[in-house]
Amino acid sequence: MVKFIDDNGVEFFECHPAEARTAIEIIQDIRDKNPVLSPEAKKVLKLVPKLISGKRTIVESSDYRSAHRIADCFSTIEVHGERVAVVLCDARAYAEIRKWDRDSIEIESRATYLKTGIMAYLWGAMVVIDRKAPKDVFVVSSEDGEHVAETALVREKPPIVEILSKMQKLLSEAIMGIR
């Protein structure tokens, strides 16, 4: 007989060797449907529905770059002495984060976590994507969901940035022409 023993050393199932492969496949299916997650990950995932529908502080930022806007949200939470636990966004907003350098973001590689929407870690906080998350918005929350901030993803540089860039280029060309 083949005995199946759990992580605590307790026998939970016994079968004939010919049935063992089927039993292993069934156990694997159960684990795939109910992935083993850390307590912190479970806590964060329970928080997601509240973040989608709950009250949030809108953080305005003069900077169009998403890293700076999200950092402003982090500071809004940290001012209360809280640690940021989750950054919630939709897939399009997450695509913006993926473009950052690899020093800022740590991509999740475990399939069980990816299936739940936990995609990466940003400055120690889990980055979770959800289809129900507000479109093109980053929602940043403390561990308990008490303090929540959001900022919009800005896809284009504001016109003033474009004008300043052109002015800088023209000035550089003029200075080079004087030399």
Image: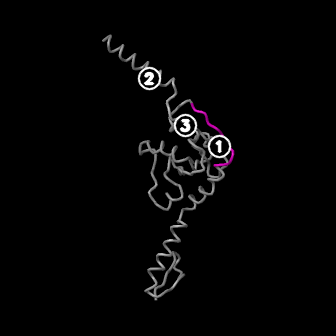
- Give the x, y percent position of residue 87: 56, 47
* Secondary structure found at label 2: helix
- Which residue, given by chain and number where applicable, does mark 2 sit on? 165
Q: Nearer the viewer, residue 21 or 83?
A: 21
Residue name at image x 49 percent, y 57 percent: 114
The x, y position of residue 75, in whole percent, is 58, 39
Q: Give the CA separation, mark 1 to mark 2.
A: 37 Å
Q: Relative to 22, is 58 on the left or the right?
A: right
Dot 2 or dot 3, earlier in sequence: 3
Residues rendered magenta in the picture: 52-61
Q: Report the number of discs.
A: 3
Q: Quadrant of the C terminus?
A: top left
Per the picture, the main secondary structure of the magenta-coloured stretch is: loop
The answer to whether residue 176 is magenta is: no
Q: Which mark is residue 69?
A: 3
- Which residue is pictured at 58% across the width and 43% down the height? 135
**Closer mark to the observer between disc 2 and disc 3:** 2
Q: What residue would you read off at disc 1?
A: 80
> Circle 1 — which element?
loop
Q: Earlier in the sequence, mark 1 or mark 2?
A: 1
Badge 1 density bin: few <14, some 14–19, many ≥20, Cα 10 Å: few
Q: Nearer the viewer, residue 18 or 70?
A: 18
- Report helix, strand or loop for mark 3: helix
